[in-house]
């Protein structure tokens, strides 16, 4: 359906632009009115780029008029009909004239209704097939819409949710624990601002522990709250894999630190250290989320006797994205081999940097 609508828009745009150009208009003029580049206008009207419905509407208004009438031109061209309906001569008789006007009005009204219904069904089908859940509430916080994904996430049929006040859902569905979600909802409702929430926990009526992320988007009319659109993404699998990943690294006998890179030589503030790394450098009681990566490295430096040499090593090889190792002398009188290297995907794109710290001579002392 989306491709068909784009084809219709392109046919109408081509026809209407010819008429617009004859009157002295230009693509540069359209671009200036819309605040976009001429090349983008050309690409949209030529069909090499697909514009949003809002931008298509704006272009239609400049070239022709109401969007529904603009699309009707494209549909007539697609069906090998004349692009525009010729106006019939007005009958002299007053009654006949009135009947003709009413007939045209009814037919046009039916056409507009049909096109609006088509557009509504088109976008509702898109929303229904999203992998993310969508809930919409009214100004009284009653649920007025829910897509199919809501059932997959919560286990509650969307039909049963309709008409339920979102604050009363736990009462209506025993076993559902959604207090964290409700807190975020109330915050977005209070400040009337878009609010992103990340990996909040809920419990479904079936006893499934779920982690949700998404957006809460208040609807505001004349500065007053008028309901909420809730985008809900199930991040449970991601959360479970993250837990397994952390538990696996905590079982590793070596100290490991992993940091995400924005680009080669530039740290992002996302990193992880396993249990052994935190113990070795005095961070047992700290979660990586509580301090930045630079603060973590500063704390590591306090336990390294040859700290200056180690710092120089980090800067040199991190900036050059090279793998390298050096021996560090710990304040516990032991020596460790610090190895740092890039984490690269199958396409060669660097995603992060990993450090592995192994005690020197430990295996030989144990006879391994």
Image (cartoon, rainbow, N blue to C red):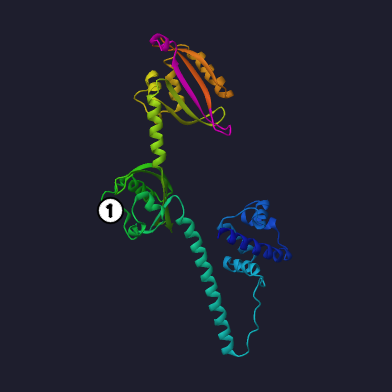
User: Is residue 366 magenta-colored?
Assistant: yes
Q: Quadrant of residue 83?
A: bottom right
Above or below 217: residue 307: above
Task: Provide the residue designation for mark 1.
Answer: 173
Q: Which residues are magenta?
A: 343-368
Of 262 and 222, which appears nearest the observer? 262
Q: Mark yes or no: residue 229 visible.
A: no
Of 333 and 91, which appears nearest the observer? 333
In this view, the residue farthest toward the bottom is: 93
Label tally: 1
Q: Quadrant of residue 85?
A: bottom right
Residue 313 in percent (x, y) is at 53, 17
Residue 1 in percent (x, y) is at 55, 60
Residue 19 in percent (x, y) is at 70, 66
User: Is residue 7 magenta-colored?
Assistant: no
Q: Residues within 10 Å of mark 1 (few under 14, many from 20)?
A: some
């Amino acid at each position: 359906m989306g491709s068909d609508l784009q084809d219709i828009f392109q046919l109408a745009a081509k026809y209407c632009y010819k008429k617009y150009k004859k009157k002295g208009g230009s693509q540069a003029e359209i671009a200036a009115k819309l605040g976009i580049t001429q090349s983008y206008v050309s690409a949209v009207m030529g069909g090499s780029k697909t514009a949003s419905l809002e931008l298509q509407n704006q272009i239609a208004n400049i070239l022709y008029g109401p969007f529904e009438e603009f699309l009707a031109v494209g549909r007539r061209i697609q069906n090998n009909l004349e692009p525009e309906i010729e106006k019939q001569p007005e009958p002299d008789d007053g009654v006949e004239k009135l009947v003709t006007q009413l007939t045209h009005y009814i037919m046009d009204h039916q056409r507009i209704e049909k096109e609006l219904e088509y557009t509504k069904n088109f976008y509702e089908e898109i929303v229904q097939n999203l992998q993310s859940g969508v809930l919409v509430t009214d100004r009284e916080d009653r649920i007025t819409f829910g897509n199919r994904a809501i059932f997959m996430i919560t286990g509650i049929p969307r039909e049963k949710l309709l008409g339920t006040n979102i604050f009363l859902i736990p009462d209506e569905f025993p076993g559902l624990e959604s207090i964290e979600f409700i807190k975020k909802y109330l915050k977005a409702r209070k400040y009337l601002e878009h609010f992103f929430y990340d990996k909040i926990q809920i419990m479904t009526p079936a006893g499934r522990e779920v982690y949700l992320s998404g957006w809460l988007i208040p609807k505001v009319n004349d500065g007053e709250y008028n309901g909420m659109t809730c985008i809900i993404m199930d991040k449970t699998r991601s959360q479970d894999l993250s837990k397994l990943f952390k538990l696996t690294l905590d079982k590793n006998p070596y100290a490991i630190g992993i940091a995400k890179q924005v680009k080669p030589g530039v740290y992002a503030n996302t990193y992880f250290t396993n249990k052994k790394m935190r113990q070795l450098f005095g961070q047992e009681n700290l979660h990586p989320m509580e301090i930045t990566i630079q603060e973590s490295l500063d704390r590591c430096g306090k336990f390294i006797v040859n700290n200056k040499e180690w710092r120089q090593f980090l800067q040199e090889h991190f900036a050059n994205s090279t793998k390298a190792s050096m021996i560090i002398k710990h304040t516990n009188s032991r020596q460790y081999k610090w190895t740092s290297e890039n984490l690269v995907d199958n396409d060669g794109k660097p995603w992060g940097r990993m450090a592995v710290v192994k005690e020197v001579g430990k295996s030989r002392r144990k006879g391994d």
